Image (cartoon, grey):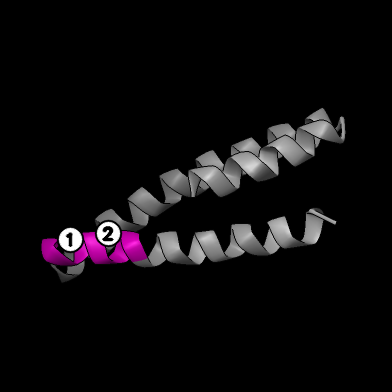
């Protein structure tokens, strides 16, 4: 996830749109906080062994989203 994030961030920075770069960074940080909070809730309600499964599922989904964005902005 970090590698894809960095690629996207580099592309955004190269286009000299600092507000977009700032918003992208904020979105990623917010997503990480949201992921942790959501996994905490799920882990508490369903059971702690599921905590890592929820995080993994959310990470896979986020990587897919980031890859889609990367595909769209690389051209």
Describe the element under mark 1 as helix, strand or loop: helix
Q: Are marks 2 and 1 in contact (CB under 8 Å)?
A: yes
Determine the main secondary structure of the stretch shown in magenta.
Answer: helix
Q: Is residue 28 left or right of residue 24?
A: left
Considering only vertical position in the picture, is 37 above or below 61? above
Q: What number is the disc on residue 44? A: 1
At horizontal 45% and vertical 46% (from top left) the residue drawn is 32
Specify the quadrant that holds the C terminus.
bottom right
Could you say which is closer to the camera, residue 64 or residue 49?
Answer: 64
Quadrant of the rendered image containing residue 44: bottom left
Q: What number is the disc on residue 32? A: none
Q: Position of residue 18 (x, y in %)?
A: 80, 28
Q: Position of residue 54 (x, y in %)?
A: 30, 65
Could you say which is closer to the camera, residue 75 or residue 55?
Answer: 75
At horizontal 70% and vertical 59% (from top left) the residue drawn is 69
The residue where tag 2 is placed is 41
Q: Position of residue 46 (x, y in %)?
A: 17, 71
Q: Is residue 9 left or right of residue 34?
A: right
Q: Which residues are magenta?
A: 48-56
At horizontal 61% and vertical 57% (from top left) the residue drawn is 66
Q: Is residue 55 left or right of residue 20?
A: left
At horizontal 23% and vertical 60% (from top left) the residue drawn is 52
Quadrant of the rendered image containing residue 7: top right
Q: CA distance from mark 2 to mark 1?
A: 5 Å
């Amino acid at each position: 996830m970090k590698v894809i994030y960095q690629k996207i961030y580099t592309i955004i920075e190269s286009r000299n749109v600092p507000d977009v770069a700032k918003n992208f960074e904020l979105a990623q940080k917010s997503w990480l906080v949201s992921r942790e909070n959501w996994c905490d809730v799920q882990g508490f309600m369903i059971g702690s062994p599921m905590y890592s499964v929820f995080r993994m599922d959310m990470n896979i989904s986020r990587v897919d989203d980031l890859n889609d964005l990367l595909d769209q902005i690389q051209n």
